[in-house]
């Protein structure tokens, strides 16, 4: 029900009557929804020339977003020449197919530097003019712009500091040309370190979204590393919270991701990875996924082959879009039979579950009732209550209510990888057939080593390859620079061998090596230990550290066990004194500090007992104002301490109900001054001359004065009614 109050003012002949102040209930007036959906594709330069033939097929598959744009050289071939023909042709073709293009500010101009794969460091005014003119010309047709493409790879000598200058100049020029333009940072792989250094070098607050290309992380799915894939967005958010807190929730895009045919990747497994890519990306909050590429351009990754005919991956994507609909909502994740990953979505018509078994396994799952099971590659559907899952994903249409409820409960819980390793002091991998992983995982063990039984126990013979790589469960350690100890139990295969390796790891300054470590002998098992304090594990290349022998000449050793220990003890107790105080459209929260805490994770739910969603990670203060809330809707909060050892236990839950905002009215000379708290967001000032209807948004400009939203409206010789509508 609306909250109303009536106030009468008399100004002689200026205005007579009453002003009715209304606060509308949610849903009566909402902002337009975002125009994005997650289904997109990218194109190579080689296939870009045939866009007119493949765009209709992408549209038919349900794709809405296409990453394709001319380079600077093509738009401005000389300093005084602008050629819009290619850009307009691309935009017109896309529009005719109901597709949207995402723009790129792409590479240098040859009249600025003969090597176009360099940053325009010698002529930033020309760069800014190019960006400004392109954005202005595309205004209303292109909203999202990616600054460069993989600057680490396609800008010779391009440092993060120089990329920051490229970005800030582009951001300022684009916003001046079109305030609605959205600007994205771009990196190869999941190069969080490059992003971090770019932000620190000056790009902070000069971007609206993040673009990554997680090819290598996708490759690890064949080794069962879904948990690393599911941690791409959370790790980016950790970095943003630490380096640019105002931007920690900006959208994340996968503007390139794909798998090339060859080796263990077949057309069938490629299509299966399309399903896994889009479902897990949507599940972790990726705003748009642009599979590389639409049509084959020489990389063996196309949804269409070089002749323009569909590969199995095309049919997989088409079936997925048909079932999930253009704007799917992920309800949460499942672990069926405690081993098979599943992701539940509100689909086009009903709830849909995407699920599969770990690599090289099958498992019978009892859904408790008959469900429709669709093979997204073949479009064949069956009805069954029990199904034998394999690593090939299926879509379950009409998910039982009990599984939907379980997924919703799981949504904000740590995503498991053979267990939950949040808050433990160490993780390990015991080598064998198979390995016994406890929060630590060997990447592709069968391709880099051989399972053996030696000296009375299981181990791995590492002479098969020149390197063995490991990934840590992200719930144990991710991005945080904690002091750790890595231990490896090793021995020579024979006394005459000369094995050794360099421990290489992701650090705060890039991938680095600790130096050569010889395996001491063949007479017993030896434990090698390394203490590291500058680790920054983000999984850029799909793993966190490796034992690199340089060649198989030095890899003749057995490996029995690897252990990683966090040397910083995590918080053992939750914060106390947690208090929530309501205000207009907000809740003010405060709590007592915890000795040794470096920050606090604050979480909120609209249901008592959760699940609670993270509001802000690693908050330095012991107070927070949660603004922009819906008045009258109860909010439930928990807070936990954070340090280098991890996240501590949650506090007791507190609850509060945000208050309705008060709309104050003060008479002035020929005008009225309307004001309300700035803590109240997403409310519009509306007016009408007669009740009960006819409400329109007031034309008055809204300014912030003395911490309040203020609007001056002219007085008139008639009744006028005002309200705040959400």
Image: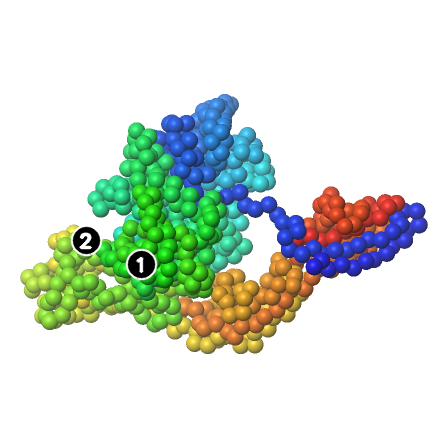
Q: Are marks 2 and 1 in contact (CB under 8 Å)?
A: no
Mark sitting on residue 372: none
Looking at the rendering, which quadrant does residue 238 occupy? Answer: bottom left
**Side of 651 relative to 460 (left or right):** right
Which residue corresponds to mark 1?
A: 386
| 649 vs 260: above or below | below
Q: In the depicted view, which residue is nearer to us: 4 or 285?
A: 4
Tag count in the figure? 2
Q: CA distance from mark 2 to mark 1?
A: 34 Å
| 467 vs 378: above or below | below
Residue at 34%, 52% (x, y): give it.
383
Q: Looking at the picture, how far across and down is residue 190, in whole percent?
A: 37, 50
Looking at the rendering, which quadrant does residue 490 occupy? Answer: bottom left
Density class for disc 2 (Cα within 10 Å; few <14, some 14-19, many ≥20) is few
Which residue corresponds to mark 2?
A: 447
Residue at 78%, 59% (x, y): give it.
5
Density class for disc 1 (Cα within 10 Å; few <14, some 14-19, many ≥20) is some
Of circles 2 and 1, the one toward us is 1
Q: Looking at the picture, how far across and down is residue 9, in whole percent?
A: 87, 55
Looking at the rendering, which quadrant does residue 629 occupy? Answer: bottom right
| 572 vs 494: above or below | below
Secondary structure of the residue carrying numbered label 1: strand
- Confirm whether residue 392 shows in the render: yes
Q: Looking at the picture, how far across and down is residue 646, in whole percent?
A: 41, 68
Counting residues from the start of the chain, the first of labels 2 and 1 encountered is 1
Q: Looking at the picture, how far across and down is residue 66, in whole percent?
A: 44, 37
Residue at 47%, 35% (x, y): give it.
99
Q: In which quadrant is the N terminus drawn?
A: bottom right
């Amino acid at each position: 029900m609306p909250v109303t109050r009536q106030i009468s003012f008399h100004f002689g002949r200026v205005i007579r009557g009453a002003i009715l102040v209304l606060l509308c209930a949610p849903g009566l007036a909402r902002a337009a929804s975002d125009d994005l959906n997650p289904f997109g594709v990218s194109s190579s330069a080689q296939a870009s020339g045939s866009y007119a033939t493949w765009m209709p097929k992408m549209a038919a598959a349900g794709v809405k977003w296409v990453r394709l744009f001319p380079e600077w050289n093509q738009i401005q071939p000389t300093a005084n020449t602008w050629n819009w023909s290619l850009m307009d042709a691309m935009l017109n073709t896309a529009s005719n197919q109901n597709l949207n293009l995402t723009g790129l500010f792409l590479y240098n101009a040859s009249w600025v530097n003969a090597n176009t794969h360099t940053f325009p460091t010698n002529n930033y005014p020309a760069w800014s003019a190019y960006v400004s003119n392109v954005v202005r010309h595309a205004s209303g047709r292109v909203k999202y712009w990616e600054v460069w493409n993989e600057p680490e790879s396609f800008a010779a000598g391009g440092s993060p500091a120089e990329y920051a200058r490229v970005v800030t100049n582009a951001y300022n020029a684009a916003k001046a040309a079109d305030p609605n333009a959205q600007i994205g940072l771009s990196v190869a792989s999941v190069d969080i370190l490059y992003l971090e250094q770019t932000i620190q070098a000056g790009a902070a607050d000069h971007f609206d979204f993040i673009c990554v290309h997680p090819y290598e992380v996708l490759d690890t799915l064949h080794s069962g590393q879904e948990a690393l894939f599911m941690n791409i967005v959370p790790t980016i958010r950790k970095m943003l919270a630490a380096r640019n807190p105002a931007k920690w929730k900006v959208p994340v895009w996968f503007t390139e991701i794909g798998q090339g045919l060859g080796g263990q990747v077949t057309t069938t497994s490629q299509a299966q990875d399309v399903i896994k890519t889009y479902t897990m990306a949507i599940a972790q909050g990726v705003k748009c996924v642009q599979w590389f590429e639409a049509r084959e351009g020489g990389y063996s990754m196309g949804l269409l082959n070089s002749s323009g005919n569909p590969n199995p991956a095309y049919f997989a994507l088409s079936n997925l879009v048909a079932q999930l609909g253009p704007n799917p909502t992920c309800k949460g994740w499942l672990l069926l039979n405690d081993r098979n990953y599943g992701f539940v979505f509100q689909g086009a018509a009903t709830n849909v579950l995407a699920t599969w078994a770990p690599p090289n396994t099958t498992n019978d799952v009892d859904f408790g009732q008959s469900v429709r099971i669709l093979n997204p590659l073949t479009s064949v559907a069956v009805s069954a209550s029990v199904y034998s899952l394999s690593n090939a994903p299926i879509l379950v249409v009409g998910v039982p209510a009990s599984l939907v409820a379980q997924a919703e409960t799981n949504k904000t819980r740590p995503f498991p990888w053979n267990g939950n390793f949040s808050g433990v002091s160490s993780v390990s991998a015991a080598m064998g057939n198979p390995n016994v992983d406890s929060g630590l995982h060997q990447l592709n063990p069968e391709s880099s080593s051989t399972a053996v039984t030696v000296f009375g126990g299981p181990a791995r013979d590492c002479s098969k390859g020149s390197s063995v790589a490991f990934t840590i469960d992200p719930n144990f350690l991710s991005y945080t620079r904690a002091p750790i100890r890595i231990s490896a139990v090793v021995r020579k295969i024979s006394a005459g061998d000369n094995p050794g390796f360099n421990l290489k790891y992701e650090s705060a300054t890039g991938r680095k090596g600790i130096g050569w470590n010889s395996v001491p002998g063949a007479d017993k098992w030896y434990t090698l230990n390394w203490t590291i304090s500058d680790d920054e594990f983000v999984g850029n290349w799909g793993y966190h550290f490796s034992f690199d022998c340089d060649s198989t000449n030095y890899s003749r050793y057995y490996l029995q066990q690897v252990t990683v220990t966090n040397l910083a003890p995590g918080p053992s107790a939750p914060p106390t004194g947690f208090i929530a105080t309501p205000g207009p459209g907000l809740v003010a929260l405060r709590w007592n500090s915890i000795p040794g805490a470096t920050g606090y994770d604050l979480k909120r739910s609209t249901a008592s007992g959760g699940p609670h969603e993270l509001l802000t990670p690693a908050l330095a203060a012991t107070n927070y104002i949660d603004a922009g809330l819906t008045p009258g809707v109860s909010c439930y909060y928990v807070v936990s301490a954070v340090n280098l050892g991890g996240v501590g236990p949650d506090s007791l839950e507190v609850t509060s109900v945000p208050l309705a905002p008060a709309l104050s009215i003060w008479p002035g000379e020929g005008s009225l001054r309307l004001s309300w708290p700035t803590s109240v967001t997403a409310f519009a000032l509306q007016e009408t001359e007669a009740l009960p209807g006819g409400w329109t948004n007031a034309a008055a400009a809204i300014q912030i004065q003395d911490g309040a939203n203020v609007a001056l409206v002219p007085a008139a010789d008639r009744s006028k009614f005002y309200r705040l509508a959400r």
